[in-house]
Image: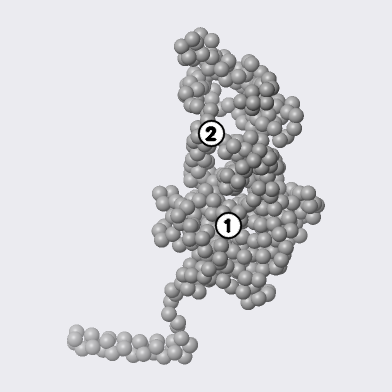
Amino acid sequence: MEAKLGNKKYAHILDKKFRWGVWAAPKNSAGEIDYNVALTGDDLVKFVNDELFPYLSSFKTSAASSNTIEYKIGEIFDEVRNRLRSGYALREVIDALDKLQFRSQDQKHELSDLYEVKIKNMGNAGRNGGEYYTPRPLIRAIVKVVDPQIGETICDPAVGSAGFLCEAYEHMKQKADTVKKNQILQESTFYGKEKKSLAYVIGIMNMILHGIDAPNLLHLNTLSENISQIQERDRHHVVLANPPFGGKEFDAIQENFPIKTAETAYLFLQHFIKVLKANGRAGIVIKNTFLSNSDNASVELRRHLLTSCDLHTILDLPSGTFQGAGVRTVVLFFQKGSPTKKVWYYQLNPGRNLGKMNPLNDADLADFVNLQKTKTDGANSWTIDAKDLNQETWDLTVRNPNAEGPAELGSPAEIIAELEALDRESTVLVSKLKALLG
C-alpha cells in the first residue's frame, strides 16, 4: 500500500521460494491448500530446518542497518530452533496458522493480546520466577505516572518481554498525529537491553506485534557495562524497568559499579540512575527489602538515590502482585538532578487477597494514579519529610501512620503492675476451684 501511494514498485522482503504462499500454503483454484504441491512429512521438516531458518537468520548480516525489520527477522531466527520433529505435526500447525488473518490493525492487535496471554501464562507457571511477566495493570499505572512524551527516549535496560516499552507505546501513539511524530515513535523512542536469549526474542516479537516494526533492542548484559563510561549520548529521558531480583553477580561485574554488591537489582538501580538524563524520570519495581536492609550497600544506595534524585513517590504493593515470585515489592518513582525533599507513600490495598484467580487489575490502581497527581494524603497515603530521615541508615521502611495498630503497651512499670494483678486474680481463682473440689 505504501509503495502504491508513493508510485513505487514494491520489493518483497523474502525471496519467492521462502514466501508463505509458496512453501507453506500454496493454493489451488478453489483457494484451498494444494497438497499436491505443499511440502509435508520429512520434506517439510528438512526444508524448514536446512533452508528456511538459515535463510531467515542470514538477514542479520545482510540487512542494510540494525533498525530495519529485516535485521530483527534475522535476530529472531538466529535464536530460535524448530522443535517439531514430525513433519506431519508441523503440517497441522501450518494449516491452522493459514486460517488466521493478520491483515488489519484490529487483527494484529488481537494477535498481540494472544501473545501477551502466553507470556502471562509463562510467568504464572513460575518459570524462571515469572521473569517474563510484570502485571500489565501495574505497568500501565507506572507509565501513566511517569507520562512519557513524544520526543523523549524511553529505555528499559532489563527489558524482558518488553512489557514496559509496549505499554509506553500504547500510551503515546494517540499523540502521534503527524507522519513525523509517528516516525519518531517508531524509530527513535524505545530502547532496551536483554541478557537472556529467550526473553530477548520474546521482547522483540512482543514489540513487533504491538506495532513497533524495528525495535531498538540489544542482546547483551547491561551490567557488563562500566557505568563510569556512560556518556551523555547514552542517556535517556525516561527509564521504566522491573530488574531481576534475587540474582547474584560475579566480582568482575561488580567492579563496573561504585557501590559493590552481588544483588543484581541493586546494580541495575545504579545503572538506571546513571543512564538518566538531567531531570530524567524513572519508575522502577524493586523488592521492598531495599527500603530497610541494613547492609552497607543498601544504605549507601539509598543515600545515593535520595541525594542525587528526587524520590517523590513510593508505591507499596501487596503480596500476590507477582504470582510465583513470592516476594513483596515496591515501585520507586524519581527524577534525577535534585535531592529528595519529601516522599509520598501509597500503600495499595485492593481489599482482597491477590492470586491467579484474583489478579491485580486497572481499577485497583485507579485511586493511586489519581491521588499521585496531587500527592494527597489519606487512609492509604502519607508524606514524610526527607530531613526527618536517619542520616546514618536512610531507612525508608513503609510505616502507614493511619493504619490501626495494637494499643499502646504502656511503661515497663505499668506492664509489671498489670502482670502482678493478673497473677493475684489467678491465685484467687485457683483457691476457689480447690474449695469446690474439696
Question: Residue 279 location, x and y as percent?
Answer: 71, 59
Q: In which quarter of the image is the C terminus?
A: bottom left
- Above or below, 41 against 240 in this view is above
Q: Of helix, strand and loop, which one carries label 2?
A: helix
- Above or below, 260 against 377 in this view is above
- Above or below, 121 against 265 in this view is above
Tag 2: residue type? Gln
Label at residue 105 = 2
Q: Of helix, strand and loop, which one carries label 1?
A: helix
The residue sitting at 66% across, 18% down in the picture is 15
Q: Indicate left or right for 97 with 268 as reference.
A: left
Question: Residue 228 location, x and y as percent?
Answer: 79, 55
Whole-angstrom CA distance, mark 2 to mark 1, is 27 Å
Name the image quarter holding residue 209: top right
Q: Indicate left or right for 243 with 232 as reference.
A: left
Using a 10 Å C-alpha cutoff, classify the residue at mark 1 as few (fewer than 14 neighbours), some (14 to 19) or many (20 or more). Answer: some
The residue sitting at 36% across, 90% down in the picture is 421
